[in-house]
Amino acid sequence: MKPEMNHSQTSVGASISISPINHITSDVAGLLANFLDALLVRFYPRRICQKVNVVVTELVTNVIQHASERDGEVKLELKIGSDGLVIKVSNRVTREEFETVKAVFDEIFAAEDPRDLFARTVRERRIDRQRGGLGLIRLTAENKFHLSTQHVDGVLVIQATFP
């Protein structure tokens, strides 16, 4: 990679789907994240590629661990170019499952400072000896992603955007 080149003008897009989710038996989230990291580092700074790695790992892992429709698919879409980075992960969910996810997002959106929310959540979970539940907060607090979620025709779409 030549330093004088403006690689941010390079656009890369990828779409990967795997079904059924129930057949995923290994660290597919890590594999996908490492693949995209290895591809994007050819065009973008390492710090951006590491952000992609973290987001893909977190969002795909969430679907694999929590999807109740085990015969459904997980879909990953990535687009990066001069207008920013967008990563979408989607899978089929019930309305009730969407409401549970949305409650987490509402808490993140309501936080004045995501870093304070992260620190408070870590303390609360440590007291109760709970594990997990920090990934989405970390994406906003530490990695500066803007997260959004929607429920369209029974499909939960989580989008992470980085300018």
Image: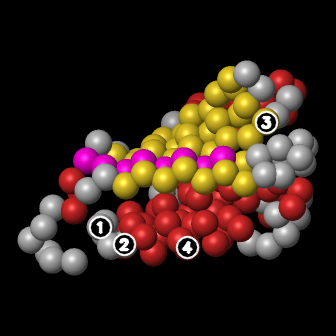
**Numbered tag placed on residue 123 in the rendering:** none
* Percent position of residue 158, x then y: 62, 39
Answer whether residue 145 is visible to the viewer in this image: no
- The answer to whether residue 55 is above or below residue 40 is above
Dominant secondary-structure state across the stretch colored magenta? strand
- How crowded is the residue under tag 3: few (<14 C-alpha within 10 Å), some, or many (20+)? many
Task: Give me the residue at 83% from left, 24% from top.
Answer: 95
The magenta segment is 75-82
Is the C-beta separation of discs 2 and 1 under 8 Å? yes
Q: How many labels, in total?
A: 4
Q: Quadrant of the N terminus?
A: bottom left
Q: Give SS at disc 2.
A: loop
In three-dimensional space, the C-alpha distance between marks 2 and 1, rounded to whole angstroms, equals 5 Å
Q: Position of residue 26 (x, y in %)?
A: 80, 73
Q: Which residue is mark 4?
A: 34
Q: Nearer the viewer, residue 127 or 59?
A: 59
> Disc 3 marks which amino acid?
Arg
Q: Earlier in the sequence, mark 3 or mark 2?
A: 2
Q: Are marks 3 and 2 in contact (CB under 8 Å)?
A: no
Identify the amino acid type marked 4.
Asn
Q: Earlier in the sequence, mark 1 or mark 3?
A: 1
> Which mark, residue 41?
2
- Per the image, the residue denoted by label 3 is 92
Q: Is residue 14 left or right of residue 19?
A: left
Q: Are marks 4 and 1 in contact (CB under 8 Å)?
A: no
Which residue is at a point 14% across and 75% down the rendered structure image? 3
Q: Which mark is residue 43?
A: 1
